[in-house]
Amino acid sequence: MSGVSIEVQLSTLPHSPGVYQFYDADDKILYVGKAKNLKKRVTSYFTKNHEYGKTRVMVKKIRSLKHIVVPTESDALLLENNLIKKYQPRYNVLLKDDKSYPWICIKNERFPRIFPTRRLIKDGSEYYGPYTSMKTVKTLLDLIKSVYPLRTCNYDLAEQKIANKKFKVCLEYHLGNCKGPCEGLQEEEEYHRQIDDIRQIIKGNFKSSLHYFKREMKQKATEMKFEQAQQLKEKIEVLENYQVKSTIVNPKINNVDVFSVVSDESYAYVNFLQLSHGSIIRSHTMEIKKRLQETDEELLQLAVVEIRQRFDSQSKEIYLPFPIALGDTIKMTIPKLGDKKRIVELSERNARFFRQERFKQVKITDPDRHSKRIMAQMQKDLRLSEEPRHIECFDNSNMQGSNPVAACVVFKDGKPAKKMYRHFNIKTVEGPDDFASMEEVVFRRYRRLLQEGESLPQLIVIDGGKGQLSSALKSLEVLGLRGKIAIIGIAKRLEEIYFPDDPIPLYLDKKSESLKIIQQLRNEAHRFGITFHRNKRSKAAINSELESISGIGEKTTEELLAKFKSVKRIKEASIENLAEMVGMVKAKKIYENFH
């Protein structure tokens, strides 16, 4: 539709459900979206004032659009998902996943073999899955193998070939792992009854197998075949143990998909659980990169369609934490209590655990992404106008009013920048006055940065409550920086966060990463200030010990400490060594004082 203006294209859009595609000047696809009402949705991009920067940038790039009308909203969802995967437009969330998932194959043979595979061949075989990990597949196959003797050879067990005695039983037969259908020692009907039971076990239903084995066990016991009855009892125990471990909710919850979503500023994590007879038979968590500040509802809707398609789910009911538009073909349940609610909460826990694991991995493999996420989260949590890439934190230290000092620590991208830490001796305040001390150091710090043309922080953190915060604000006011730098105070008792001109504190979640960064800043400022204070008191104590000697002043003390490094070595020095530094008269006084 080149040459036709956007206005003309918008005017001809229908009020029908469908999918729209935006293109730039080079006819490159920018975005794919779906809508209940194409005209209303697409027009909104060009009439709304978009707050989010990326949406504004995208709209400026749009030069043409295309649309596809579909019968229903659920058709629009499926088409949108397929187009996103096909074209991977720049402004759509990433749903890419090249992983090849394992399946369990029941081979289309006279005596079917059962094995894991990543390749689906259209030869009439049955495929169950895909499973999200090979470990799950192997556990299930080990269970089946321990209960049912099945063949593992790939012979063509045609009826005529067995009749002609073409094959001989192998070691698996002698080990009891196979009943020898290759020599006609196992009937085809009995073998297929086993396969029927295995199909049910794979689907999470153990009822048929347990019923059969219990009946057989009683029969063998009646016939006085106690050894065979014991073997059947062991099979029952294996199945029951596995069933107990795999059943996590009411067994009546059958053929249900469960979805949940957790998200931060940049990514969302959607967990999927598939339930059959109360057992989780499939679990998967998808990571989605946000592009245009998509809501949790939009992301969950996209993910549900993609995951159900990817794992070929035929479940007729899904449990969700909140309603989303999925059409009328699927029953949607939003549980409020009981077993159904618990399974949604379990799904959310899985999503959160996955998110935490990704955080730990990304922290090691991609520190830039990790710091960007932390900064975006802090900006949101603390209601800042920009990401706090440069943060400074102040803390006062004094002991009974002696040697008052203050510390300023600096974090860049959420990490300590120790070379930029600064100590302050309090100069204008007499006695222990935390408020006045805070006012002094904040003024001195930012007056100097302004004079030297250094970059200012995006956030200042004050260790203390409303009083210390007000004192720091006075200095920013004098320097003309109030409102130009975000500033907060953190009170120790309940970790309350105070904002200027707001008497009501903010309480961040105790597990919040934003709070952890602020606590780390506060603790680092405290540690740095205490170390400086301790050193200063120690030095003052040493100096007073030497200066208390008659005739020994500050200059002599400094010379002696520069030479001998400590009071202990001065005490151990001979008169001759001392005299070389300060002369014999002073040397005698010092020596006699310590001896």
Image: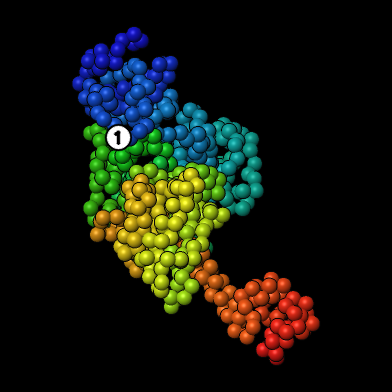
Is 72 placed above or below 347 here? above
Residue 19 image-quadrant placement: top left
Q: How many labels does the image show?
A: 1
Res. 498 visible in picture? yes
Is 368 placed above or below 48 here? below
Residue in front for this viewpoint, 197 or 563: 563
Q: In which quarter of the image is the N terminus?
A: top left
Q: Where is residue 216 in the image (x, y as percent from the top left)?
A: 43, 56
**Visual colour scheme:** rainbow
Name the residue rendered at 53%, 41% in the picture: 116
Residue in front for this viewpoint, 474 or 508: 474
Q: Position of residue 480 (x, y in %)?
A: 35, 48
Name the residue rendered at 24%, 47% in the picture: 334
Q: Position of residue 84 (x, y in %)?
A: 40, 27
Residue at the left extreme of this rendering: 15
Amino acid identity at mark 1: Glu
Is 575 placed above or below 340 here? below
> In the figure, is residue 390 to the left or right of 273?
right
> In the figure, is residue 390 to the left or right of 18?
right
Callout 1: helix, strand or loop?
loop
Q: Position of residue 243 (x, y in %)?
A: 41, 56
Name the residue rendered at 31%, 22% in the picture: 20
Residue in front for this viewpoint, 229 or 297: 297
Residue assigned mark 1: 51
Name the residue rendered at 65%, 76% in the picture: 557
Q: Quadrant of the C terminus?
A: bottom right
Res. 211 visible in picture? no
Residue 181 image-quadrant placement: top right
Other-residue count near label 1 (Cα within 10 Å), few / some / many at <14 / 14–19 / ≥20? few
